[in-house]
């Protein structure tokens, strides 16, 4: 086997390992560091296995999100240990200050929601939450198709926000408002308790299928700080703003709607949103300086790519 073929074969093996490790981690009782190392190596290996193209860029991004999803879910593999570590009180106290004595989410629900009834505007809020699963990735794809030369920076900003947020989920597992309310940590005065309105609406619309769907997508219920729903939506809005006024207006309108929805529906504190937005801004400012350094640090990887695909005389 030639050197080029051997390098490509090793790269494909690393890709396969990175895809498989999160899937078999529970069965094989793999350590989190092993799973994360394998999953994080897969997108890097794919840049060696395949020649440059838009398809490769999209696949590398997908593998990066696969690694993020593993990092997001793994703290919940040991549910008992996660519950023992979870922080519940501090966002409640901060939001009580921001809400002048009562949580903003509590104030909104008690003032605007009618028990068991969802108005059209509330359904819009729920759906703005549900479509989030596509929004950051659709933004990255939009840039890839429209301005491929700007895709690396756009992807770094959106997916860097995801990845740094996952680090906080490990270091500071924090409960969302609905969890704190169910555990009796939120004072609602004489009014009705804070409820998880998204779940209630989902059960109305999807019935028994809701539990199965949320069980697949939920992953880790104790990963509220920072809000990556809001943070990645802000990152997407920033990217769209850089691409044009119309896109920026749409992006910020969506991020604003989602931010209100997250608080109103009981999914996040205002504190979570502030942290998510701040994280997106930090990543935006850091990306122009980080990308050139990352390219310089990737000289060995560039050498492997040249060996894997030597120039034809």
Image (cartoon, grey):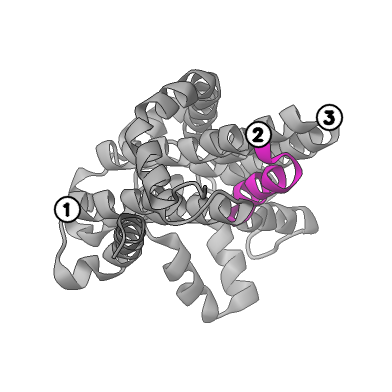
For disc 2, the marked residue is 150
Q: Using the image, determine if residue 164 lies above or below residue 176.
A: above
Q: Using the image, determine if residue 56 lies above or below residue 22.
A: above
Range drawn in magenta: 132-150
Would residue 233 appear left or right of 83 to someone viewing this image?
right
Residue 270, image x, y percentages? 53, 32
Q: Which mark is residue 81?
A: 1
Would residue 240 appear left or right of 43 to someone viewing this image?
right
Q: Nearer the viewer, residue 81 or 68?
A: 68
Residue under the point 62% across and 66% down:
201
Q: Which mark is residue 245?
A: 3
Q: Main secondary structure of the magenta part?
A: helix
Q: Earlier in the sequence, mark 2 or mark 1?
A: 1
Tag in front: 2 or 1: 2
Residue 156, image x, y percentages? 52, 35
Would residue 293 appear left or right of 83 to someone viewing this image?
right
Tag in front: 1 or 3: 3
The answer to whether one can see residue 138 in this image is yes
Q: Earlier in the sequence, mark 1 or mark 3?
A: 1
């Amino acid at each position: 086997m030639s050197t080029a073929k051997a390098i490509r074969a090793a790269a494909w093996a690393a890709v396969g390992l990175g895809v498989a490790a999160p899937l078999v981690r529970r069965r094989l009782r793999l350590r989190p560091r092993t799973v994360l190392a394998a999953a994080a190596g897969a997108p890097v290996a794919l840049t060696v296995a395949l020649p440059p193209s838009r398809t490769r860029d999209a696949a590398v991004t997908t593998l990066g999100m696969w690694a993020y999803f593993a990092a997001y879910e793994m703290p919940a593999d040991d549910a008992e240990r996660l519950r023992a570590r979870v922080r519940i009180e501090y966002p409640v106290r901060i939001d009580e200050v921001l809400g002048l004595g009562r949580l903003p989410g509590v104030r909104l629900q008690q003032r605007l929601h009618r028990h068991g009834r969802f108005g059209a505007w509330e359904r819009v809020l729920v759906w703005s939450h549900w479509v989030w699963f596509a929004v950051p990735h659709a933004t990255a794809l939009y840039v890839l198709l429209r301005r491929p030369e700007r895709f690396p920076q756009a992807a770094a900003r959106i997916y860097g926000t995801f990845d740094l947020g996952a680090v906080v989920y490990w270091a500071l597992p924090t409960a969302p408002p609905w969890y704190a309310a169910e555990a009796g940590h939120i004072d609602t005065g004489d009014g009705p308790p804070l409820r998880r309105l998204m779940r209630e609406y989902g059960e109305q619309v999807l019935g028994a299928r809701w539990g199965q769907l949320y069980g697949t997508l939920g992953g880790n219920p104790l990963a509220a700080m920072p809000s990556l729903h809001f943070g990645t939506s802000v990152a997407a809005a920033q990217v769209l703003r850089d691409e044009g006024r119309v896109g920026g207006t749409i992006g910020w309108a969506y991020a604003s709607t989602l931010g209100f929805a997250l608080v109103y529906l009981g999914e996040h504190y205002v504190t979570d949103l502030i942290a998510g937005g701040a994280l997106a801004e930090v990543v935006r400012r850091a990306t122009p300086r980080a990308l050139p350094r990352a390219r310089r640090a990737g000289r060995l990887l560039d050498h492997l790519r040249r060996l894997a695909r030597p120039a034809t005389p």
